[in-house]
Image: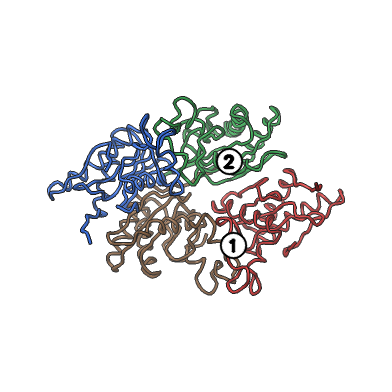
Chain colours: A green, B red, C brown, D blue
Amino acid sequence: MKQTLQLEREEARLMIDAAIAKSKEIGVLETVCVVDAGGYPIALERMNGSRITGPQIAMNKAFTAAGHKRSTHLFTRAPNGPALPGNEAFGIQLSFGGRFAGFVGGFPIVVNGEVVGGLGMSGGNGKQDTEAGLAGLQALADALKDKGLTVLVEADIKK
Amino acid sequence: MKQTLQLEREEARLMIDAAIAKSKEIGVLETVCVVDAGGYPIALERMNGSRITGPQIAMNKAFTAAGHKRSTHLFTRAPNGPALPGNEAFGIQLSFGGRFAGFVGGFPIVVNGEVVGGLGMSGGNGKQDTEAGLAGLQALADALKDKGLTVLVEADIKK
Amino acid sequence: MKQTLQLEREEARLMIDAAIAKSKEIGVLETVCVVDAGGYPIALERMNGSRITGPQIAMNKAFTAAGHKRSTHLFTRAPNGPALPGNEAFGIQLSFGGRFAGFVGGFPIVVNGEVVGGLGMSGGNGKQDTEAGLAGLQALADALKDKGLTVLVEADIKK
Amino acid sequence: MKQTLQLEREEARLMIDAAIAKSKEIGVLETVCVVDAGGYPIALERMNGSRITGPQIAMNKAFTAAGHKRSTHLFTRAPNGPALPGNEAFGIQLSFGGRFAGFVGGFPIVVNGEVVGGLGMSGGNGKQDTEAGLAGLQALADALKDKGLTVLVEADIKK
């Protein structure tokens, strides 16, 4: 048996609050989802006026980032994204019945080097999703700093 | 064109907060989801320690209650539930690829006689899901009372 | 953040070896799957000559037991199984696109009171699946005893 | 009626052991799956610390390789892979609800010229998946050599 860290609801909530605060600041309507290490939602919120497609896409991105331990845009960012046509993982995005989201807006939540969950954003363009998502990661980093835990706060995460 | 009322995030949040407060009071671990009139999640929270299966089931119940305008247990409560074997809608629960949840824990959110969304609970037995779910509906009723809006707060809702 | 225990491959392997040894002893052909707390397979083996349907069913049972923290036969054992027609959770087995297996052969793996995974058996009747499955749980119990960890070894597990 | 060769569990196990030994040697975390001629899993193992997405993807690759009698990367390797946009089988990867994996990591298991199963790897890049996968095929070749059976051990297999 191995000891691991598990994300809790209060932490998911503060990440979502921070991501939504940033979304408001930059003027974008987002759905935000935080999932555990298994890709299962802990909390989700959809901003008023944002798209009804947001929840499923945000959940998919969070699942993919947590499950595949990678920021989702890294799968398809030109020209080297492995899931682009002509590159070696083209087709991986068909896995999991369409839940595998290999495009911008999903970030693994990495604490002390281990992936403990994922954060998914849907609603903005890539720059907006990323800025709001990083605000969510930063909020967790701030909250855990005093407990001696380090959270990765960067766009391109690949474990 | 018709004017309709639309549930907002702040309202979904206070429903979830109330449902979770009641869940803690009665000692049960729940996932709570509030969806809009189209069955799309507005907010979801999973209590620490509750089941990973909770989010999908809570979303399904909320979707079904909002979409079919009916408390979900009414589909299969013995002996007259229409989706029970031998009764006339047996099989309806196979619609929507498994998302149609005809069992206890989903309640339509009815404001001034119109269904504006659904509330889904997963984690407890029927009595617990219902008690916590009604606490959620009550919180919305309390919040909207001063605005001249009436919210149905009862277990057996059928529009 | 919460500290939790995580099942490892070596442990999954010894559970499968023990379950298959017992299956041979009692003369039944089984597929055995061990999943983690999120329901994702760690290891799976199908005995020679057993059914091709075994892997999916064993995975489904292990997923359900781990995810819903309950021995799978408890959902539908007569007369009180909650997922039987007329009882309050009838229809829960339609969740997760058919992966929710509410019938005999899935057991949560509970270590020091926490669900860390699931064990799924497919191939025998209920008595055989249970006997071989419990042999798997017993093997883990034996392996972890010296580490001060306690594993539940019983047919009816409900957390 | 025709006599065919059928892969057995002991053979699947030694292939997996060899693929995992090679994965450790080259420093990559893999999930390995061996399926029969019908694409049904015989055995699967996921290395500690590897991705939870690994089992499904490895199963998909093994299924595709066994079922379509072809190394999976041959579908999409530039510039002539038939499943690339612009080439004649683009879209084949949508068959089977996402289970058709036309990218690197799946290899048919060919014995005396007949496809008897598939080996799927998920976790590394293409070079790593291939190196570990070939180690699995080589282990089977070594085990069957004395029985007068020949196993194809090469990356580009197309029957």
Tell me where residue A31 appears, x and y as whole percent: 64, 39
Q: Residues within 10 Å of mark 1 (few under 14, many from 20)?
A: many
Residue beneath disc 1: B93
* Chain assignment, label 1: B
Of the residues shown, which amino acid type is indicated by label 1?
Gln
Q: Amino acid at mark 2?
A: Ile
Label tally: 2
Q: Examine the image and state in which quarter residue A146 appears.
A: top right
Q: Which mark is residue A157?
A: none
The reply to whether the C-beta atoms of the residues labelled 1 and 2 are less than 8 Å apart is no
B82 or D83: which is nearer to us?
A: D83
Please state which of residues B6 and D81 is positioned toward the viewer in this rendering. D81
Q: Badge 2 is on which residue?
A: A57
| Res A143 quadrant in image | top right
**Seen in the image, is B68 located left or right of residue C39?**
right
Residue at 51% in and 68% down: C76
Confirm whether residue A156 shows in the render.
yes
Q: Position of residue B73 (x, y in %)?
A: 65, 65
Numbered disc 2: secondary structure: helix
Rendered image quadrant of residue C145: bottom left
Depicted C118 relative to depicted D81: above or below: below
| Residue at the image point whose x is 50% and y is 54% from the top | C67
Classify mark 1: helix, strand or loop: helix
Q: Looking at the picture, how far across and down is residue A72, in whole percent?
A: 51, 34
Chain letter, disc 2 residue: A
Instruction: Tell me the quadrant of the picture where the N terminus of chain D can be found.
Output: bottom left
Separation of marks 1 and 2 at Cα, in angstroms: 25 Å
In the foreground, C157 or D140: D140
Q: Is residue C38 left or right of residue B157?
A: left
